[in-house]
Amino acid sequence: MPRIPSRNTRLMLGITLIAVASVGVAASVFAVTEAEQRRIDADAATLEHLDQLVAVLDSAVGRQEVGLDDYVLSDQPAALSSYQDAVAAEAQTIAAIHAGGFGLPDADAAADIVGTLGSDWRRLIADPAIRARQASNATGIAAFAAEAVNDRAGIDSARTHLTSLVDTAHAALDGRSSVLSVARAIATWTSFAILFVAFGLALILVRRFSRTVERDAREAGVVNRFTEVTSFAGDDREIAAANLVALGRLVHPDASVMHVLNRSMDRAVPEATTGDTVAEVLPLGALERCAGMLRGSMFVAEDLADDLSVHCPIYPATRGTLICVPLSSGERVGAVHLYWSTPRALPLTQRAGVVRITEHAALAIGNRRLLAALQGQADTDPRTGLANSRAFDRAMEEKLSARASAESLSVLMVDIDHFKQFNDHHGHPAGDEALRVFAGVLRSCLRDGDVAARYGGEEFAVLLPGNDRDAALAIAERIRSRAESTIVSLAPGLTDRITVSIGVATTPEHALDRITLLRLADEALYDAKNAGRNRVVVLAPADAAADVPIAHAGRKRPARAEASS
């Protein structure tokens, strides 16, 4: 399945696309306006040419009037020639205006008006005046001259109109150029504004990403330290306490509690609490009513004061924020409740961290229980359900190391009498049943803290911490008596009985180390068998001190204290 980019990544990609789009739009605007600018430049050149033609036309009209006046007054041929050149220039200029294609129909019409009025002026005024001058008709010259002055008003008006049209075209061109400049400015500043906003948003995202990285690093640090602590935790209580400390560092609840189901799954124990939480041991099934346990995932009540808010019966708060997180590691092992006095106190960004830590806590408890179960299987004799010799030796070493110098500790070595004959007579299944029955006898005679083990074959060992010689003898006698009176059911209608021999050794009376104590208890057991079996024997302290290591001497019969049936 393809990996979906994160929300921040998608936002950053969107901001980048916006920035690129803004630059692209600005570039497009400049490309379009550049074409318009070229058109404006071309139109400006055309108008410049028209300006020149209008100036030439205006000059030609003016030179006609001056040349005519000079000729009429002075009769100079040069003046007449200047007048005729001006007439020709007028005609050429009007033709050029028509041929120029300037796109100003009104200018063409105005030029035509100038030409028409000029032609009428020449026909009615100038030409008659020239003929009068050539005929030396002074009266005619004066009359025509006065008429010429009065008739120039129309031509001047047409020339002014043509100039105005050109000026209007220039103004329109200037307007187009201004609009172009404004469009470019708008595009430029809009692009800058978008880029500035995009940069600002990117900066915000970078800061948010930085905070996210810092939060993730802090969360990872808390999880790593919590993982290390749980690796060395001795029991569920230590794991629960470390879990609430880790959650406190991560989300800072005002109060919290962690319930853990015991191994028999019949009650939930509040192994750790923080704040002013008052938690009780919950009976069978009570924890299942937790909102998180019912949902099977983290449940968040953001405002307990809301009438529509769901309330958890395990943590009956009426206001603030409450989250319920079930603990599961293959099977449910408990639940964590975190409470804040203010509503909506747990942001969405921190909820994943809570789940990670609680999942690890559940995993640590589950792994510890699995390891304990495997260890129990490795330390348990499969036929009797008692500890095996390895577990017994380890427990004995631990008890000896932990005991105070004056504290007593006793060991019993127990052997089922004539077990080989029992096995041969009734068969191996009956022998296994006898072992199981005697294991039950041992359990019924011992206290919590005592350790019973099948040490090998039909031999058993019992560890009695805090029991001196006399107490150990009493317990041993109880075991012997109860074994003797217990009926072993072998088959329908078939029963038998067993007896046991027991040797006792006690510290500090007999020895201080495990190997010597076991050897002396075994010596006492040997004496019990040699004395006729079905009895309890303990070596006298003087004999134990005088004894030699079992590896270097055979068994012997020292003086002994004996209890028999």
Image (cartoon, rainbow, N blue to C red):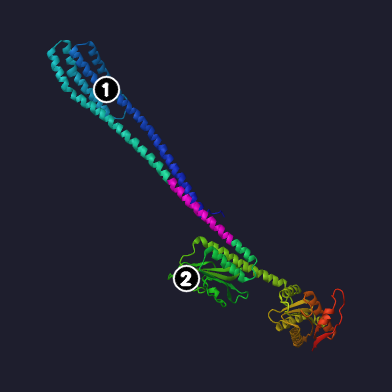
* SS under mark 2: loop
Which residue carries the number 2 mark?
A: 310
- Magenta span covers which residues? 194-222
Specify the amino acid type for callout 2: Val
Mark 2 burial class by Cα count in 10 Å: few <14, some 14-19, many 20+: some
User: Going 40% across and 43% down the picture, which residue do you hit?
Assistant: 189
Tell me if residue 210 comes above or below residue 398 in the rendering.
above
Residue 535, picture quadrant: bottom right
53 or 508, which lies in front?
Answer: 508
Q: Residue furthest left?
A: 139
Query: Is residue 532 within the magenta segment?
Result: no
Residue 284, picture quadrant: bottom right
Which residue carries the number 1 mark?
A: 57
Q: Residue 518 carries which label?
A: none
Q: Residue furthest front?
A: 405
Task: Name the dominant secondary structure of the magenta segment.
Answer: helix
User: Going 36% across and 39% down the picture, which residue do you hit?
Assistant: 182
Residues at marks 1 and 2, CA–CA distance in whole angstroms: 97 Å
Tell me if residue 138 comes above or below residue 43 in the rendering.
above
